[in-house]
Amino acid sequence: MATVEMVMPKMGESVMEGTVLAWLKNVGDTIEEDESILEVATDKVDTEIPATHAGVLKEVLAQEGDVIEVGKPIAIIETDGDAGGATPTPAETTKSEDPVEKAEEILETAINTASASNGTAVPRTSDSGKFFSPLVRSIAKEEGISVAELESINGSGKEGRVTKNDILGYVKTRKSGGAPAPSAAPVMPSASHQPMPVAVDGGDEIIEMDRMRKMIAERMVASKHISPHVTSFVEADVTKVVAWRNKVKNEFLNREGEKLTFTPILIEAIVRAIKDFPMINVQIDGNNIVKKKAINIGMATALPTGNLIVPVIHNADQLSLVGITKKVNDLAKRARENKLKPDELQGGTYTVSNVGSFGNVMGTPIIMQPQVAIMALGAIQKKPSVVETPEGDMIGIRSKMFLSHSYDHRVVDGALGGMFVRKVADYLEEYDLNRGI
């Protein structure tokens, strides 16, 4: 028998650590290679981690709630293989030349050495026992934040840990000359904006928010606080889109093995409109406007739990309708199965929310920061409508939907916001019925 040390895997370019949410296997259980054995949460996504080897789960090295750095051991797996090729157990780790651990040691030494030279060295754990992650320590070093300052930040992480958002909020407040930000929770401008107390009666049920719901709540409140929202509406005649989809959907399914829904068709029209109005595809950095080159479309997706997640279609402008369809279906499926990768939730430049999937005709969506706009797609409904013909105006049955465009009025004025959503409607109303797939 041999033992293999399983480490916390890298789950994205900017993800340096993960929190163990739950073990799906118990010590002594037989596990297969690539079988999910624990759930891990990062600041981007909750995901299941597969076993690196088949065998028996011999020892659990990280308990639920522990924050573990990437590359650090989380479990020992006993395999049927030769001990000669096995990963060393924790007792042998000090003699190991594991490349991940070696790289981390080099990085740790470099950070501490550089920090010591300017007097801002930040230890893993302070004298009071407060833990600081590698990412937090790195930001503290770059910004010249002392250990005493870190100690003063009320962390929003588990057991008061200081998260990336906590320290970035502190840095932003400090640069603006204000008082230190107490936490990553949205800062309210005055006491009058504090939540009102809730009276609880004996028959009321109290349900604690789960981790994702708390995160969504914080981000939505923060977005409304940051961006002055304005929403423009256009009712688009999508009769041609409906007719074309009905004509090709069976052929599309047989040829591509994918269902063709309206969502990728609508996303394609939005991408075309972004090319026409690139100032919608921007972000705000202080007093600067960052005009994004990539067009990365976030698609709000409802989870079975009722929570919301926004996977991103990167470089959507470089994809055909077939490519967008495959991306939409794949991301939606893996979102519901909790199998998204952290990088698939990052980098969005414009977001789409299909409220029509719930039977809603329109909505006023909240902007995903640091983006400046988001569009809600309403339900498609058949309506009596005036139709212009060579013989004159007539009443006909048309398929229509509302497009609701919310935008950040700091940088997107009504003219741009209104013209953009009108352009999306134009592309849908002028759809080519003879288009191939």
Image (cartoon, rainbow, N blue to C red):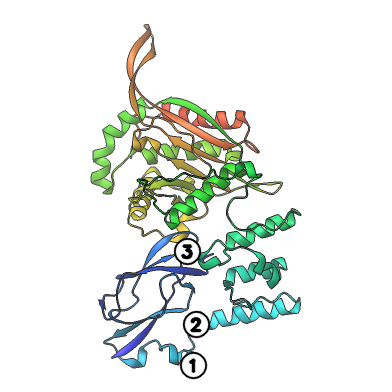
Q: Quadrant of the N terminus?
A: bottom left
Q: Secondary structure at mark 3?
A: loop
SS at mark 1 in the image? helix
* Nearest to the observer: residue 217 or residue 379: 217
Vertical arrangement, residue 134 with respect to residue 89, above or below: above
Q: Which is more N-terminal, label 3 or label 2?
A: 3
The image shows residue 314 at horizontal and vertical percentages of 47, 52
Which callout, 2 or 3, points to the residue nearer the camera? 3
Q: Marks 1 and 2: which is nearer the front?
A: 1
Residue 266's place in the image compared with 11, above or below, is: above
Mark toward the start of the polypeptide (1 vs 3):
3
Three-letter amino acid code at the position of disc 1: Lys
Three-letter residue code for mark 3: Thr
Percent across and percent down for residue 140 are 67, 68
| Callout 2–callout 3 Cβ contact below 8 Å | no
Whole-percent x and y of residue 224? Answer: 57, 42
The residue beneath circle 2 is 99
Seen in the image, is 68 located left or right of residue 188? left
Label 3 sits on residue: 42
Q: Residue at x 45, y 36 (%)?
A: 376
Q: Residues within 10 Å of mark 3 (few under 14, many from 20)?
A: some
Residue 371 can be seen in this image:
no
Q: Amino acid at mark 2?
A: Pro
Residue at 69%, 58% in the rendered image? 180
Residue 195 appears in which quarter of the rendering? top right
Distance (Cα) linking label 1 and label 2: 12 Å
| Crowdedness near tag 2: few (<14), some (14–19) or many (≥20) residues, C-alpha within 10 Å | few
Provide the residue designation for mark 1: 95
Left of 249 or right of it: where is 234?
Answer: right
Q: Which x, y percent locates residue 83? A: 33, 92
